[in-house]
Image (tube, helix red, strand yellow):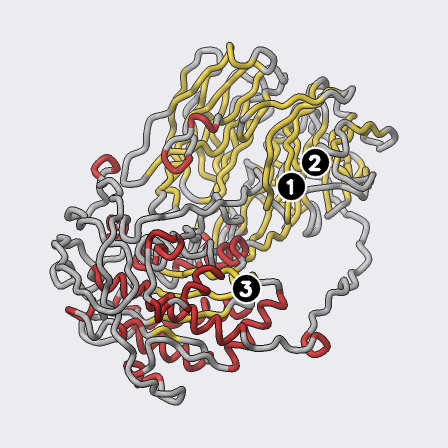
Amino acid sequence: MQPLAVKSSTCLLALLSILLLLTACQPQPAAAPTLPAVEQPDAPTLPSAPSAAPEQPAAEPNADSAPPEATPSPVSPASVPSAPANPGETLPPEDWKNWPVVPQVSDRAREIYQQGLQRGTNPQAFSVVGDCQSIPGVFMGVFGHPLGYSLKPEEQYLQETIDHFSGSFDRDGIAVRGGFTAASLLSPLQADPSACKPGESPLSCEFRVHNPSIVIISLETWRTPATIDRYEVYLRQIIEASIQQGVLPILATKADMAETGKEHVINPAVARLASEYQLPMMNFWRAVQGIEHKGIDPERDTFHLTREAWLVKSFTGLRALDAVWRAVSAQTPPAASETALNTAPTPQPTALPLQFTPPDCPAGDNCVLLDLIESRDGSLHDRGVFTFNLDSQALTPLTAEDIRLQDVSPDGQSALLSRGTELYQVRFADPAPTLITDAFVDHGSLSAFYLSDGQSILLLSDREGYPAVWKTSSAAADWQKITAESDSPIALVKSPQAGWVYWQAGACSSRIVCQASGYQRTSLDGQTQPVGDVQQLVLSNDAQSLAFMDPQTAGDYGFIDKLVIENAETRLPSRRLIVFPPANGYKVRNRLNQYLWSPSDSHMLILVDEFSKYYEQSSGYHLFIFWVKQGWYTEFPRLTGIMPGAVWSPDGQELFLWVSKAQAEGQYSLSFERFNPFKQERTVLDQNPALTGLPYTYVNRAFWLPPTP
């Protein structure tokens, strides 16, 4: 697995320039009307909405037909009604319509906020959790741009809040997206794979990446009216997950009752949970009761807001954030002696010697050595090393949990296994492991492998107090440092042939969460050269060719859908650019996922992800076999699921394919296939019940073992 890059925020200048996205939330497609003029009341000046988007068909529009984003222009102030007299904190949830527009703050809310600060939340960051009516283009994003708004003299106090939370208003958050529901926020399948860990939900990913101290939860849609009661169940889980992370939720009501068309269901549920958990609630429903059509666009549907209501929602959100922030930050943090966290390391049990059962693959059978990882909402747990028999379909554990597979020797008779900072070699003929080092460094990508002689090992180690690339023997008798102290390697690129050692530089904050700074290659005598501006570098087995993605070929959304192959020495004059058929669909684009050289380097397996940027989901992985010398490829039926992968057979004639698939809520399965592209034979290996009913589990690495004589 490549290190997970830290995602940068995208600033959205226009308050209403993404009207096209709103169709994902609507119950049914409808024409967008010409909006009426806005009156001139007392309120801050906000940018105007662009002209309404054209009517969208029920099916997803073609990408080429999507309207361009509009440029914002100044408008007159919008009407923000004054809140009626404060009803106090004692109104029951059933009387939610009379709750104040700007929320009150309980002692419990202050406690949640202060506990979060002690855990390390950022007091200058807030997040938004929501659907298309909460994206920064229509909700509060304008406050991220000094020229996008103005405040009247009596509202100048809000500028302090805008300045304090600068960087959060116009941020393209991970937990807000068109089409999101309360259930979506908790599903790993909905997470942005470019920013989130495998198995991490959008909510947990947002909290990890942005580290907010406050979160505004504004989830206004539920797609199935018959199961609207599930909304409260999922919203409760979102609230509890937020509190557990020390993030103070601000709940929000909505203007419509489109979930049933007859009565409010979502708003009372929001009020019940706000009352139960003693959380602040922004009563947006009440804020729009004094404006035309009560904020609902009558010519579109019963859900979408008018332009005026969008402006009201943004300003109400700012007022709510201001009120909550001032209330919780004025509270003096509890004395350290009363609530201080225990920062002393937890005593760990003495590690038992690594136990390994050699793979038992009957003569004539084909077996794959692999390791599995289980993700618990982004917290990765090694399930251990297994063999999978492609003939009997038996999955057999060879180690305890917490063991990872790094590499298998060229002859298929030894393997490198790691446990934390320990790296071992195990020989299949002798199950007693040999400790190579107890200063192993593993950030989730390749960190150790055999050279072609089967005796020498390249690995990452901090045995001298800093990470470096080292070469040693399988007996760990001789050590040679390859890189310098200033190099900061975080991952190796497998290059079994002695000569140049390829590696990736950067810095990592935790497992697979790394900021890469480029690829380098170092000779065995210590001479280092930059490889250039490349991504996902893969060397051929003879180390003569490089395959990679060139960032300069990136298209929409930064996706790279072209593969570059070059000679490792001559580079640019030898460049070959492999172009694949384009994807179809609204905001659907192709991007390269992975590519593997065959053992003889004559072919490559290439997986291309057909990805919807709108839904942040893959619709499948196109599977290509590329004939390297001939320069052409064949496409085969795609893989569908998550975390796909493949490994060639030792003779280069077959492939073992895998992918994880979602089953029932919270359960997943491992789907294995045996694929001969040259005979066009493809067999699904689905006879083992142990591969179903799993938590979020995926294959980390796999090696097809040579057949037993």
The residue indicated by pointer 1 is 507
Q: Which mark is residue 186?
A: none
Between the residue at mark 2 and the residue at mark 1, the CA separation in whole angstroms equals 7 Å
The quarter holding residue 540 reads: top right
Q: Which residue is mark 3?
A: 123
Rendered location of residue 525, percent (x, y): 78, 19
* Of callouts 1 and 3, the N-terminal one: 3
Which image quarter is the C terminus in? top right
| Pointer 2 with pointer 1, Cβ within 8 A | yes
Pointer 2 residue: 488
Q: Is residue 671 above or below residue 206?
A: above
Amino acid type, label 2: Ser
The residue at the point 56 percent across, 17 percent down is 601
Q: Is residue 356 left or right of residue 72?
A: right
Discs 1/3, front: 3
The image quarter containing residue 367 is: top right
Q: Residue furthest right?
A: 477
Give the residue type that dot 1 points to: Ala
